[in-house]
Amino acid sequence: MIFPNLDTEKNLWDQGHRFIAGIDEVGRGAWAGPVVAAAVIFPRNFELPQGLRDSKLLTPKKREELDKQIKEVALGFSVGSTSVVMIEKKGIAVASQVAMRKAVRSLDPKPDFLLTDYFALKYIRKSCQQAIKKGDVYCVSIAAASILAKVFRDNLMRELDRRQEFEVYRFGKHKGYGTKFHQEAITRFGVSRIHRVSFVPRSLIPNLK
């Protein structure tokens, strides 16, 4: 079992960086709802929350626990999101970048170095960031950001599930991803205003213009 470590952060702290932000996003592959990014800055000396891993490898209960623990020990954290309208207009790659930059801009304190999962952030100096392959697996700060983003987005989808206009889709159950239940709901009721129409297979909505 692989757990992330602080090797990258320690190296950067030793180089003189004070506020190192880990950044990650969730919801890229969902058929409905926004893409959400989070950013986290840890202090140099802190007690690492036990069991902290990539959000995809955790149970919902454990993510909720770690979300609270991360916020308690972090120097700063923030969340950014981009709407379905932007995803459909600009594409998921651009929308994800925008969400991550929003999260970075909202951070307090302001970061002096960024750690990202796989993709570097555009319009930010390359000398001030490092993209790490499988960063959410190996880097504590990125893994923590993945948890905050996942918990935030899951809660948002549950809130949408409680609205009458969306209740037939049961977003709280699948969070907008293409499960069998979600596919059947789309086939029966069509798409809603928060669906990413370009993500939904045409076979499910053959009459859509």
Image (cartoon, rainbow, N blue to C red):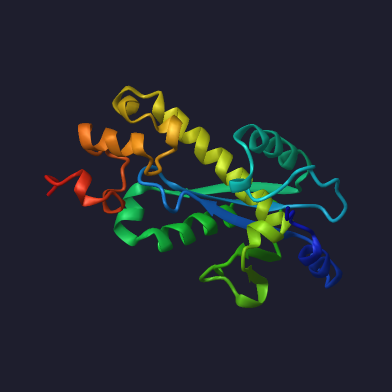
Picture quadrant where residue 191 is located:
top left
Q: Is residue 10 above or below residue 141?
A: below
Please state which of residues 123 and 67 is positioned toward the viewer in this rendering.
67
118, 42: nearer the viewer? 118
Picture quadrant where residue 185 is located: top left
In the image, what residue occupies the spot 66% across and 64% down?
115
Left or right placement of residue 4 versus residue 118 in this view: right
User: In this rendering, is residue 95 above or below 185?
Assistant: below
The location of residue 98, given as percent across then percent down, is 47, 59
Depicted 177 relative to depicted 165: above or below: below
Q: Nearer the viewer, residue 209 or 75?
A: 209
- Residue 36 appearing in the image: yes
Q: Which residue sits at x=44%, y=53%? A: 28
Residue drawn 45% across and 28% down?
Answer: 159
Picture coordinates of residue 121, whole percent (x, y): 54, 67
- Residue 129 in which image quadrant: bottom right
